[in-house]
Image (cartoon, rainbow, N blue to C red):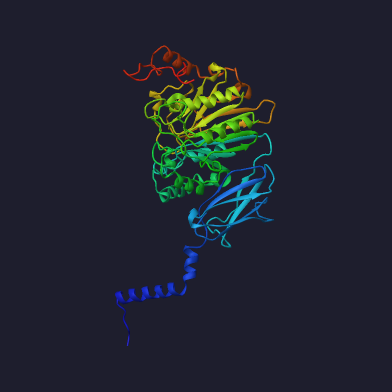
Amino acid sequence: MNLRLTPARRHFLGGSALAAFLAAAPRAIAQVFGYPRALQGPMVGAPGPNHFTVWVRASGTFPVKLEYSTSRDFDVALDGPTLTARAEDDCCLVFRVEGVQPDTDYWYRLVYAGEGDRHQPFAYRTRTAPAGPADFRIAFGSCCRIQYDAEQPIWNVVRDLDPDMFFWLGDNIYGDSDEPAALADLYGRGRVVERLAPLLRSRPQLAIWDDHDFGYNNSDGRSPYKASALKVFRNFWANPSYGEEGNPGVYFRQSYGGVDFFFLDGRYHRDPIDTVDNARKTILGARQKAWLKRELAASAAPFKVLVSGGGFSAAENEEGGDSWGVFLTERNEIFDFIRDRNIGGVLCISGDSHMGELNCIPRSESGGYDIYDFCSSPLAQMPANKNTRQTPEVRIRDTWVRSVNVGLLKFDMTGSTPTVTLTLHDVLGDAVWDPLVLTPADLTNGVKTWDAKADPLELERLARFKRGGGYYGYDPAPGWPNRPYYDGASD
């Protein structure tokens, strides 16, 4: 007798067979779908002449081993650290490989619970820091909103610029949340952007935060969620340190190629922006400010770069301003310290404003030297033409609001006269301004440079503003602030 199977019967048997297979081979299925691997990363972190750092987020709580070699083919594989991922750290791990040679290429790979990652079959290459003065490049930017742009073409430009390090200057995610899981999710999404991944795996990444990755818009030290936000930040970055013992934060110092970089935390200890601007109002907090002064005084580097989420100029000295422009008393205290202690070579980089800016605080008029503030923003967010309502002390170049952008600092510390060249690049890679070149002699007490360094058009605009007209050629609206900040209001 022939047995005919109805469609329903065939479906039942098919489902039963599949169920039997799943029951019989759970380990095989787990190996296909849930084997140990990287969820995000790897990403290179804080560099040094004799060490390199690698971050990764594992797919579970198991041991992960880093192996490295001076050969692409791993002719000789060297064992780095073995760490075990923990759920309380979101399975994020930071490996530090010690005892390596300066200015040398190393290939590295990760082994997850004894297995290689089948989605990442090749080793990645990074390079240790030089042991002394060097010719090197730093790219930097801020305001990277994956909800706005998941493609992020600016990373094509960054890779073509071939920086030795990349600095994230805040609003690295737009978390705007008090939930650690929401922050972690956005960090994870950002780490798998296709154009960004090759940069993360090969070039050291250092980061500070601003309001949108610290908490909510314009959030400050009163935030009850700041400790949990800091824990997530520490999980997802590989900075050399985080604040000081007894004073949490994301501030630290990084030396590279003969230059000292001072990364500042402008959120964890800041006062509300609407606090009266006097000697008690702080963006850094007493401990961090004392650290900064002490580290600046101890530095012998020809260039000392202050790295901040918000800009140092008076541009945002306005209602709702969120930068150093509404903390001018503390800013000037720091600049006075630099002048009074005869600390040369200080310049600033910043973010947040959704504009490319190159401004100057003309401290030569008060016995110091002119301090330049170079802002790159945004990396992946809507640009904004806030420049039409703002006037800093001096604009060296016109603001850039036509596209996303990235800043580049090119240091040559190898010759008798060290130099740093500042350029801003648009989404196509073009430099949008003429370069600004600075030497240590430009950043020495008593030396005035801003009038010679500024574009002639910006000098014309400043002169018009100083006469009481509109900076951009039209009179300001009635009641609009129209005062030259450089005439004693901020210095």
Where does the N terminus fall, quadrant-wise?
bottom left
Q: Residue at 60% across / 26% down in the picture?
A: 345
Q: Nearer the viewer, residue 18 or 237?
A: 237
Across the whole image, how many numbered discs are drawn on residues?
Answer: 0
Residue 90: percent from the left, percent from the top? 48, 54
Residue 480: percent from the left, percent from the top? 34, 20
Q: Quick check: 394 above or below 57?
A: above
Q: Quick check: 327 above or below 471?
A: below
Q: Nearer the viewer, residue 310 or 464?
A: 310
Answer with the quarter of the image where residue 110 lies. bottom right
Residue sitting at the far top = 467
Q: Residue at 47% across / 25% down in the picture?
A: 329
Residue 485: percent from the left, percent from the top? 44, 19
Residue 63: percent from the left, percent from the top? 56, 60
Q: Quick check: 176 above or below 362?
A: below
Answer with the quarter of the image where residue 9 lies. bottom left
Q: Nearer the viewer, residue 74 or 459?
A: 459
Q: Image check: 180 left or right of 35?
A: left
Q: Quick check: 300 above or below 98?
A: above
Residue sitting at the far bottom = 1
